[in-house]
């Protein structure tokens, strides 16, 4: 005598994905993502924008470090003149 819900139908209803099946699905999604060419131009613009941003930040930091020395000299000259 079978228990209620203990037959084959019960096993199909409660299906838990195994780690192996999940790994295959992740691998398939990664391959699909790698082959997808939609949005590649947007990605290139994003990378280019990021590089421009880094160059701008580096230039501003360099400029500030050079100008702060000049302002320090001016401050010292003004305080000595008083």
Image: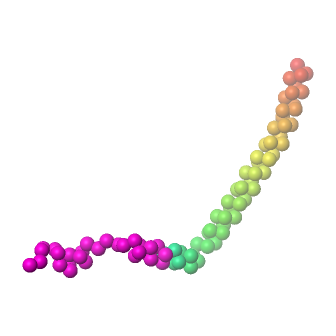
Q: Position of residue 34 (x, y in %)?
A: 56, 76
Q: Which is more toward the observer, 64 or 3?
A: 3
Q: Which is more toward the observer, 45 or 15?
A: 15
Q: Which is more toward the observer, 31 or 47?
A: 31
In which quadrant will I find the N terminus? bottom left
Identify which residue is drawn at 44% across, 77% down: 24
Residue at the farthest left position: 1
Q: Which is more toward the observer, 12 or 40?
A: 12
User: Residue 48 appears in which quarter of the rendering?
Assistant: bottom right
In reply to whether residue 80 is colored magenta, the answer given is no
Q: Position of residue 41 (x, y in %)?
A: 63, 72
In reply to whether residue 22 is colored magenta, the answer given is yes
Stretch of the chain drawn in magenta: 1-28
In which quadrant will I find the C terminus? top right
Residue 49 falls left or right of residue 18: right
Identify which residue is drawn at 84% across, 37% down: 69
Q: Position of residue 35 (x, y in %)?
A: 56, 79
Residue at the farthest top position: 82
Way the structure is coloured: rainbow
Q: How many marks?
A: 0
Residue 34 falls left or right of residue 76: left
Q: Position of residue 51 (x, y in %)?
A: 71, 60
- Would residue 47 be visible to someone looking at this image? yes
Identify which residue is drawn at 62% across, 69% down: 42
Identify which residue is drawn at 70% across, 56% down: 53
Residue 5 in the image: above or below residue 46: below
- Would residue 36 be visible to someone looking at this image? no
Residue 30 in the image: above or below residue 51: below
Residue 24 falls left or right of residue 37: left
């Amino acid at each position: 005598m079978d228990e209620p819900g203990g037959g084959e139908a019960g096993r199909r209803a409660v299906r838990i994905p195994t780690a192996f099946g999940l790994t295959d699905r992740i691998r398939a999604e990664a391959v699909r993502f790698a082959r997808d060419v939609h949005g590649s131009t947007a990605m290139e613009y994003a990378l280019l924008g990021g590089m421009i941003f880094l160059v701008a930040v580096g230039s501003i930091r360099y400029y500030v470090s050079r100008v702060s020395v000049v302002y320090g000299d001016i401050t010292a000259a003004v305080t000595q003149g008083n």
